[in-house]
Every structure is written in structure tokens, then in C-alpha cells.
Amino acid sequence: MFERFTKEARTAVVWAQEEARELRASRVGAEHLLLGTVFRDGCPPLARLGVMAEALRQVLRAAGPLGEEDAAALRSLGIDLDAVRDRAEHAFGAGALDWPDPDPAARRGRRRRAAEGAPKGHIPFAPAAKRALELSLREAQGLGHGFIAVPHLVLGLLGTGDPAVTSALRRLGTDEAAVRTELLVDLRRAA
């Protein structure tokens, strides 16, 4: 399937792996794949909707390893994650719970220091990310395209309904329907 990927789409997948590695994730998730698609403005329709790399990275960092469902479950037990974050920042300073470090220079240094703890080599794809890659092929075929570009990857991600992806888009002020519409407009223009 990867032979049909454009250079930009391949780069998005590579960056998704790098983001997962940097976060010490054991698998490349759909959220990492979404982040890979916006690296270096790889998807102009997302940029027009305000989904930019650094903003998305901050949203994913703020969500941390817990998704919206996890946060809701904790709230039902009386645990307020925002209150926990506030107390940690009061005790240890602003950004105490941030991972990865928002400073790019620190991030480069951290990559070197964390090498022994980071997954080495190929990081496997989580089921939602695998499904997104499969759906990107179907999206491309459905549009009559013999290639898979970054917009096809994003359409595939939307098709999974992954909560990390949908939550991130909503936190950035958009939703799946708006993203899909923008992507299809661009793909039809390009055809």
C-alpha cells in the first residue's frame, strides 16, 4: 500500500512515528498520525481550519495519556484533572506536567537524553492508526485517485471515529464534518 503514498504522505507517516517515539508511546496512535499530517503545513485544509502542528501538539499534550472518556470516568469518581494539574503547577511550577517539553531546543536535547528509554526501530501501529491507513486507500479509490496523499490520510483518520482525533479537532474549534468538507473541496480542485 505504501507504494501508492505520495512523498508528503510518506513523510506524514514517518513524522507520526517520530511523534510517538518522542512521547515514548509503544504504538503509533491515530493522534500521532494526525499530528504527522500537519507537520510543516502538510495539509492546507486543516491549516485553514486552525489545525496547526504546534496547536495540535499542545492539545494532545494537555490531554495526556488519558482520553475524554477516561477524564469523564475520573470526574465521576470526584477526580478533577484540571484541579490536579493546578495543584502540581502550584507546587512544582508552570508546565510541571507537560510532556513533551514545549521548547523545541529542549525537545532536541531530550531526544538525545531519552534515547535509552524511547522505543527503538519501527514502532507498531495501533489498531485505529492501521484502520486509518486502510481507510485512506479506500478514500483515494472512492475519489478515483491512483495515489494516497495527506488529505486521504486525514479522511481515513476521520473514518475511524477515534476519540483522540475527534476530541483534538473539537478542542481546536472544528469538527469532523468541517474537516471532511474542506478536504474534499481541495481534492476535487486538485483532480
Image (spheres, grey):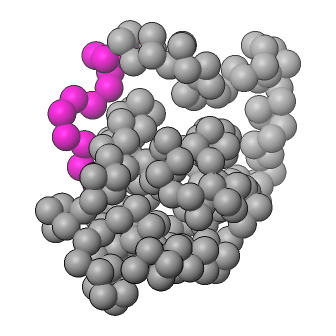
Q: Nearer the viewer, residue 45 or 131?
A: 45
Give the x, y percent position of residue 181. 60, 80
> Based on the displayed image, in which of its 4 quarters is residue 75 positioned?
bottom right
> Based on the displayed image, in which of its 4 quarters is residue 177 positioned?
bottom right
In this picture, residue 66 sits left or right of residue 85: left
Q: Quick check: can you spot residue 72?
A: no
Q: Nearer the viewer, residue 47 or 176?
A: 47
Q: Nearer the viewer, residue 61 or 173?
A: 173
Give the x, y percent position of residue 182. 60, 74
> Which residue is painted at 50% across and 19% down in the image?
107
Give the x, y percent position of residue 148. 30, 69
Q: Main secondary structure of the magenta part?
A: loop
Quarter of the picture containing the C terminus is bottom left
In this picture, residue 76 sits left or right of residue 103: right
> Based on the displayed image, in which of its 4 quarters is residue 55 positioned?
top right
Quarter of the picture containing the N terminus is bottom left
Give the x, y percent position of residue 122. 19, 40
Q: Which segment is the magenta one?
A: 114-125
State yes or no: residue 136 in magenta. Answer: no
In the displayed structure, 140 sits above or below 81; it is below
> Which residue is painted at 50% across and 78% down in the image?
189
